[in-house]
Amino acid sequence: MITEERLKILTESAKYDVSCSSSGSARKNEGGMGNGYVAGCCHSFTPDGRCISLLKILLSNDCIYNCKYCPNRLDADVPRATATPEEICELTIDFYKRNYIEGLFLSSAVCKNPDYTMERLLLTVKKLRLEYNFHGYIHLKGIPKADPLLMKEAGRYADRMSYNIELPSEKSLKLLAPQKSKESLLLPMKTLAMQTAQFREEKKKGLIKGHFLPAGQTTQMIIGASPEADGQILRLTQALYQKNGLRRVYYSSYVPIVHDSLLPDTAVGQLREHRLYQADWLLRFYGFSVEELLSENENLATEFDPKCAWALKNMQLFPVEINRAPLEMLLRVPGIGSKNAYKIMEARKYTKLSFEDLVKMRIALKRARHFITCNGKFFGEKNEYSVRGLLAAAETGENAKQLDLFSILSSPQNAMIALSGQL
């Protein structure tokens, strides 16, 4: 059994990895414990409103690498601990039976060598699946430079794998993580994508059964530890989505946990990370390309979200008529999300929409009204500078703040809205 002291060290060491969220896995329970299907895991919300989580832990934090930004680097003066595969399995099952978790996020520092570490990680997930009959969600961190055969076998037991790209350029990797290279990080992603496609093809032909990374693969980048601009970061993101079929790219704001002369002394802050996630959303769900949003050496605007910033640069395209605009243009209107864009497309088959109808759809008209007309009527500002001011105010205004449950429930009317789910 793992001791409380080692458990604290290994879970604390794992907290800096953000590349995990809802699973999207199709793995079903086949007579054992746990279920990775539909619900997902790791501080995610299911369709029925449940918040579920997973055990996030390292197999070992005793690393042979000396990455400058890493709190577990070789020359860091920190407590070291290593768990056995059996201890991780027992802990996972014990926590699952207590209803603490729905799954496991397992990573490790590189101890001894990449193959040894990957073998231990693989042994852990195999034991969980085959000996402990665990069918819950498992996210496994791959070890760069490990044997591709180990990676391929791990894909049969894990729901998701991730190889963290760490830094946005090869130059920064050479400076801050000299034992890693661009090729050692990108090649496993490419190989996994090929292995996934091959598995699906063979499964269609009935040559093979089971699963191979049903929740795909992700990666993570540290933002602000190196000097790359947002434009360069998002170009790399776009390439990863297009070439390697990644499900998600995660961004982690640099925090000066480890002090080094090659690293900044101050934290980046959450706003830059937030803007990158917003831009990432536009790339994945709104049909934008990076080239439309910003140049390679440019950073995202801080005063507006990326869609507003794009719209302000392209005012000649607006306003658009809400009852006639094609879907791809509706998706580019600030204040209209993807779900509402499809609702508008469906609703206008039966009637001409008015601003009152858009209010009922809960469209953010504080932003959208400057870029649309309804039946030829325009209720926004025509002056571009006024629009900029109003959008900036809306970004920092009351509607941009997180809702306070107790203030919401302070009046009977607000309480009824909360109960009916209209927030």
Image: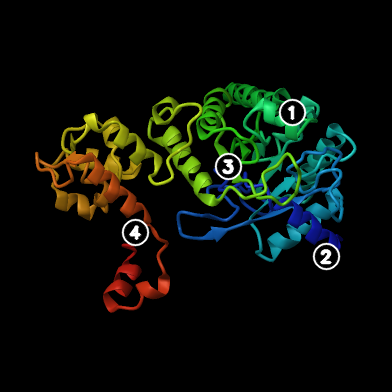
Instruction: Please tell me whether residue 321 is drawn above or below residue 413 in the rendered image.
Output: above
In-front residue for pair 260/11: 260
Q: What kind of element bears circle 2?
A: helix
Residue sitting at x 21%, y 43%: 370
- Between marks 3 and 2 in the image, the one whose residue lies nearer the viewer: 3
- Between marks 1 and 2 in the image, the one whose residue lies nearer the viewer: 1
In-front residue for pair 299/194: 299
Q: Residue 265: where, in percent of width, then height?
A: 67, 48
Q: Tell me the amino acid under the disc marked 3.
A: Tyr
Decide: marks 4, 2 in contact (CB < 8 A)? Answer: no
Q: CA distance from mark 3 to mark 4?
A: 26 Å
In-front residue for pair 208/409: 409
- Between marks 3 and 4 in the image, the one whose residue lies nearer the viewer: 4
* Res 348 visible: yes
Decide: marks 3, 2 in contact (CB < 8 A)? Answer: no
Q: Which residue is mark 3?
A: 251
Quadrant of residue 5 in the image? bottom right
Q: Residue 178: where, in percent of width, then height?
A: 78, 30
Q: Which residue is mark 2?
A: 4
Q: Residue 367: where, in percent of width, then height?
A: 27, 47
Q: Residue 255: where, in percent of width, then height?
A: 65, 50
